[in-house]
Amino acid sequence: MLMNNSFIPISQPTITKNEIDFVTKAMQSGWVSSLGEFLDIFEAKFASFVGTKYAVSTTNGTTALHLALVSEGIKSGDEVILPDFTFVATANAVQYTGATAVLVDIEENTLCIDPEKVESAITDKTKAIIPVHIYGHPANMVEINRIAKKYGLLVVEDAAEAHGAEINGKKVGSMGKCGAFSFYGNKIITTGEGGMITTDDKPLYDRLRHLRDHAMSNEKRYWHDQIGFNYRMTNLQAALGVAQLDRIKEILEKKRKIFLTYKNLLSKNARIKLNFEAEWARNVFWMVCLEFEDFTEVKRDELMKQLKNRGVDSRPYFYPISDLPMYPKTNTPVAHRVFGKGINIPSYFDLDNASIEYVCKTVTSVLDNI
Ligand SMILES: *Cc1c(COP(=O)(O)O)cnc(C)c1O
């Protein structure tokens, strides 16, 4: 056990006095719902951070994806291509529209959708591609955009895990028609629950805002011209978001430093593979990933159990979406080979060096007996 008998969690938010002050200010203003100054500030600052003209806040990352797809007219009968290795929300958001999620294999190193496999999954019904920047590594947007352009497809980036990740100096969320972000409690920055859509497209921006607010007319109150949604973020959440966004540079620097410390301590162990970073990409290392080449699910679960007994939290890689009961079985050999070999380990902002060293020592010694 740890000397102080404590448990090192996989994730925890970083909250400073500024976060508390801003949320308090929002509460004192009386604007606790979805009107208020922090909403406008958060959207403007987030657009500027990503490098897009517009940003539209939502209730969470899942509704950000759904709203983006609906606002682009994705509907029943359409097919939308996404990676088989992602959090389930990416696929579910497609299904909510009535369209069909088409699950495609990933690259072994980036764990992101494989552009070559995208092209062979395109049919007459394909309308969109959702690349996911998984665990903080950007998908190959250059290739994906090339394919999308060739076939006239919409690109919605799922950037829920990758605030600040870059390709050639351009941030994720600014390379598709739009990008969807999440501010869940374990994401790079948090608003408790929350989401954002970023875009340069004014007509899309107008449709997003319209559908987010019950599709109510700007001119005629309580006149609704289609079935809209209530996907509005609150001013309280936005206040937290503004305080978090003010610190994002510091947060991203710390995440990189944590990854490099892990890498330094673990990469000499030949059995352990850490996060990849392509030479064209800037990874934000949302979650530190460890892969064990000789592992299957059984050994992985044994490792996680023994880590937990020694006070170290971890979580398994996502299951392939196509293994979940509500999705069709799909032939995605890389996703199926990789998922059972990987875990995420603690990498939150306030993690100190002593804890990182303890995690590394524990992983290394437990591994010796598995
Ligand atoms: C977290 C996440 C989402 C959904 O975000 P919520 O805010 O939890 O709804 C979508 N896609 C990916 C890849 C995620 O990691």
Image (spheres, rainbow, N blue to C red):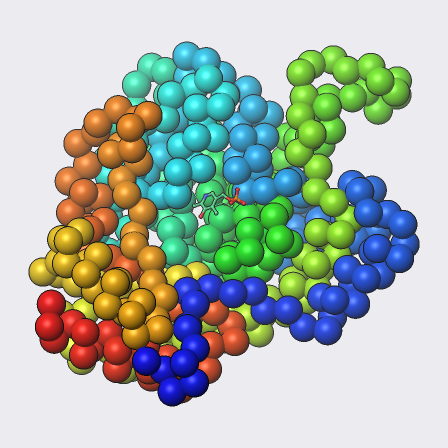
Whether residue 129 appears in this view of the structure is: no
Residue 317 left/right relative to 198: left
Residue 189 left/right relative to 114: right
- Figure quadrant of the N terminus: bottom left
Residue 15 left/right relative to 166: right
Residue 33: give x, y in percent of width and height: 80, 42
Q: Nearer the viewer, residue 322 or 302?
A: 302
Whether residue 212 appears in this view of the structure is: yes
Toward which corner of the image does residue 50 lie, by quadrant?
A: bottom right
Residue 188: give x, y in percent of width and height: 52, 60
Residue 298: give x, y in percent of width and height: 15, 53
Question: Count of labels shown?
Answer: 0
Depicted 330 relative to depicted 163: above or below: above
Q: Residue shown at 88%/18% (left/top)?
A: 220
Q: Nearer the viewer, residue 127 or 308?
A: 308
- Figure quadrant of the C terminus: bottom left
Q: Residue shown at 28%/59% (left/top)?
A: 343
Toward which corner of the image does residue 101 lie, by quadrant?
A: top left
Depicted 238 relative to depicted 79: above or below: below
